[in-house]
């Protein structure tokens, strides 16, 4: 119930649309029932008048029938139009609402979710929420309002007929939906979860196809996908057969209601308490009135699925961001000195802190390197400096200001990153470069690419800067991707530069070329480099050596051999062999 109320709260801005859509639906339904009832009465009255040889005014009932038919058609059109419009607006705003909660969680809190799962939430789960509006809310209100009107209408002829109508309408509109809801709850929840798992498995399988093929386990992955699909289809089949059953049951209720009404009303006609044409009218009225409750069993069957989807969205929306934005404006930065003051940080649920008691001061315009074995905490320092995570103790300052006082975006505007894992978007080279500076001119882009030594390569491509790089940049080599990252950093023109193993995995010649490009990029900036290789550190002003998150040595580049020697003695094989 709490989840439903929360959802209703999200629907609040669209209550005008919803009211309009519901009114249109009620009007359409009443027009349809009126059409049936008036036709029944008209035919029977004409027949009776004809048999008795008396004249009858057929203009009024004929006009009523025509009016009802027109109202029904117009009402149906308006109802579809309004409810679709409301649904699309609602879904669009739900996506924005979800995305606005998702964004502050990136990247720290989102690492526990697979991208396929997130995609499922943002697409399928949000789509499922419209069920609550179109398939539950509107039909329930329409059913309640019209049942009330129908029962009052029957009551005007005979209370016993009203009671019969109420009993059968309640059977179809309350008992069947409750049964359908209890049957649909478990499969509905499973369908939501399995759809997400299936999407995740398919994405994983496609992305890891090369590995699966190399290790000869494609069959195993295919089997997993097949099992999930079968489970999904079995649950969908169960829901469909239940839906068919409830449709038949609603039909049965309508027929039984008709028979009981005839059984009760025929004596009233015989006793002269009811005019004969009214019997035909009431019979058709009864049959038509079940249209009000017919959608309810399916509506309640879908409720389990809708609520499962809502809970998956609320799970994310309720997650606390790893870093809270400060309330006021970000401070002005006087200079770009960087200082780590006794910084300690541990990832959630980790047994040991990833970095402990780190002290590092990098004056503006100078270069520092953090060196250490795999897992020694180097990237963690970047994550803290970029404010993806916040330190548990100590502070990081830029120009003397604690970065905790900055809004993440304001802080990151001053920082460019060149990392070993440059993410290239499935777009053109130009678009990939423009993310660093959307206003950059073609001249500026080319200049940046020249410095990054990638312009000649791009210029030789048939489509030049309009070449599509493919998903995650598959059409670019590692070295080319790294140079694009350098060009991006140049275009961003930020005063602080973070280099994360920029030459890792490149051959000697490419490494040398890239180092030249980086050398030009670093001029005048405050630079922090992380690496696990002591080679090529001659151009930094200071080196911090980390071992398992703690400072092992700190000073100019000459501390490195001593420190690595000590580290080797202390931790042996945990240190990278190249140190
Ligand atoms: N997002 C995370 N969640 C939990 N633990 C993490 C996370 N990122 C890193 N760790 C852990 O924190 C420690 C430090 O990791 P970090 O990535 O900072 O090391 P690193 O020195 O950059 O390693 P590498 O050279 O391999 O990139 C490791 O033990 C790692 O397992």
Image: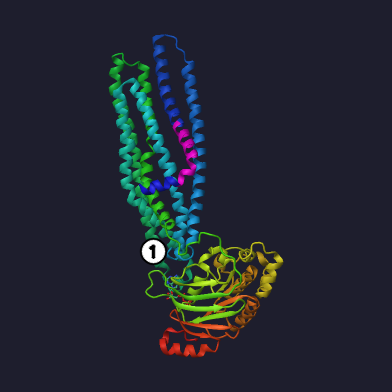
Whether the magenta-drawn stretch holds residue 19 is answered as yes
Give the magenta part as a residue range. Answer: 10-26
Q: Quadrant of ligand 1?
A: bottom left
Which residue appears at 49% of the width and 77% of the height?
A: 378
Q: Is residue 378 above or below residue 67?
A: below
Q: Is residue 329 visible?
A: yes
Quadrant of the image occupied by residue 411: bottom right
Which residue appears at 52% of the width and 83% of the height?
A: 533
The residue nearer to you, when weighing 307 against 550, is 550
Question: Is 42 placed left or right of 181 in the picture?
Answer: right
Q: Position of residue 22 (x, y in %)?
A: 45, 36
Question: Is 221 placed left or right of 410 in the picture?
Answer: left
Q: Is residue 243 above or below residue 572?
A: above
Question: Is 480 placed left or right of 389 in the picture?
Answer: right
Q: Position of residue 329 (x, y in %)?
A: 56, 60
Pointer 1 local density, CA inside 10 Å: few below 14, some 14–19, many at least 20: few
Which residue appears at 45% of the width and 56% of the height?
A: 120
Magenta span main SS: helix
Read off the residue under disc 1: 223
Q: Position of residue 117 (x, y in %)?
A: 44, 60
Quadrant of the image occupied by residue 172: top left
Whether the magenta-drawn stretch holds residue 382 is answered as no
């Amino acid at each position: 119930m709490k989840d439903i109320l929360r959802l209703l709260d999200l629907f609040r801005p669209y209550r005008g649309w919803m009211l309009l859509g519901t009114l249109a639906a009620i009007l359409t339904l009443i027009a349809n029932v009126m059409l049936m009832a008036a036709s029944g009465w008209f035919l029977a009255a004409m027949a009776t008048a004809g048999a008795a040889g008396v004249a009858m005014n057929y203009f009024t009932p004929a006009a009523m029938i025509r009016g009802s038919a027109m109202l029904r058609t117009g009402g149906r059109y308006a109802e579809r139009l309004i409810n679709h419009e409301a649904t699309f607006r609602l879904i669009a705003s739900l996506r924005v609402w979800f995305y606005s909660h998702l964004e502050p969680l990136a990247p720290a809190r989102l690492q526990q979710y697979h991208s396929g799962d997130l995609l499922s939430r943002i697409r399928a789960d949000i789509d499922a929420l419209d069920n609550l509006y179109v398939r539950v809310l509107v039909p329930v209100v329409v059913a309640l309002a019209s049942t009330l009107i129908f029962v009052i209408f029957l009551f005007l002829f005979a209370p016993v007929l009203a009671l019969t109508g109420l009993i059968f309408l309640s059977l179809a509109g309350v008992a069947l939906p409750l049964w359908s809801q209890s049957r649909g709850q478990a499969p509905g929840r499973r369908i939501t979860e399995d759809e997400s798992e299936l999407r995740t498995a398919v994405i994983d399988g496609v992305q890891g196809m090369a590995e699966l093929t190399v290790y000869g386990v494609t069959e195993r992955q295919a089997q997993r996908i097949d099992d999930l699909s079968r489970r999904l289809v079995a649950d969908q089949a169960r829901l469909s057969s239940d839906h068919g059953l409830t449709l038949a049951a609603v039909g049965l209720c309508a027929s039984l209601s008709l028979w009981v009404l005839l059984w009760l009303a025929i004596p009233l006609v015989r006793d002269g308490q009811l005019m004969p044409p009214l019997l035909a009218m009431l019979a058709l009225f009864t049959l038509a009135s079940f249209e009000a409750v017919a959608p309810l069993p399916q509506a309640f069957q879908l409720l389990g699925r809708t609520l499962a989807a809502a809970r998956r969205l609320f799970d994310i929306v309720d997650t606390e961001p790893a870093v809270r934005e400060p309330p006021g404006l970000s401070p002005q930065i006087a200079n770009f000195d960087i200082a780590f003051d006794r910084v300690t940080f541990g990832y959630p649920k980790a047994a040991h802190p990833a970095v402990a008691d780190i002290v590092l001061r990098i004056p503006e315009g100078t270069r520092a390197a953090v060196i250490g074995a795999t897992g020694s905490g180097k990237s963690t320092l970047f994550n803290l400096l970029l404010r993806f995570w916040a330190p548990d103790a100590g502070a990081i300052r830029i120009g003397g200001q604690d970065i905790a006082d900055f809004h993440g975006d304001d802080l990151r505007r001053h920082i460019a990153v060149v990392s070993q894992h440059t993410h290239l978007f499935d777009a053109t080279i130009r678009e990939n470069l423009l993310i660093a500076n959307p206003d950059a001119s073609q001249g500026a882009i080319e200049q940046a690419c020249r410095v990054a030594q990638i312009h000649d390569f791009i210029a030789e491509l048939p489509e030049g800067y309009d070449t599509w790089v493919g998903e995650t940049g598959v059409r670019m080599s590692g070295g080319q991707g790294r140079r694009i990252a350098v060009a991006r950093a140049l275009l961003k023109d930020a005063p602080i530069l973070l280099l994360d193993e920029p030459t890792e995995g490149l051959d000697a010649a490419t490494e040398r070329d890239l180092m030249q490009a980086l050398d030009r990029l670093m001029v005048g900036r405050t630079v922090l480099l992380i690496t696990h290789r002591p080679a090529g550190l001659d151009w930094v002003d200071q080196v911090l050596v980390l071992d398992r998150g703690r400072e092992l040595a700190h000073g100019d580049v000459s501390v490195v051999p001593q420190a690595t020697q000590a580290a080797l003695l202390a931790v042996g094989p945990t240190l990278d062999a190249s140190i």
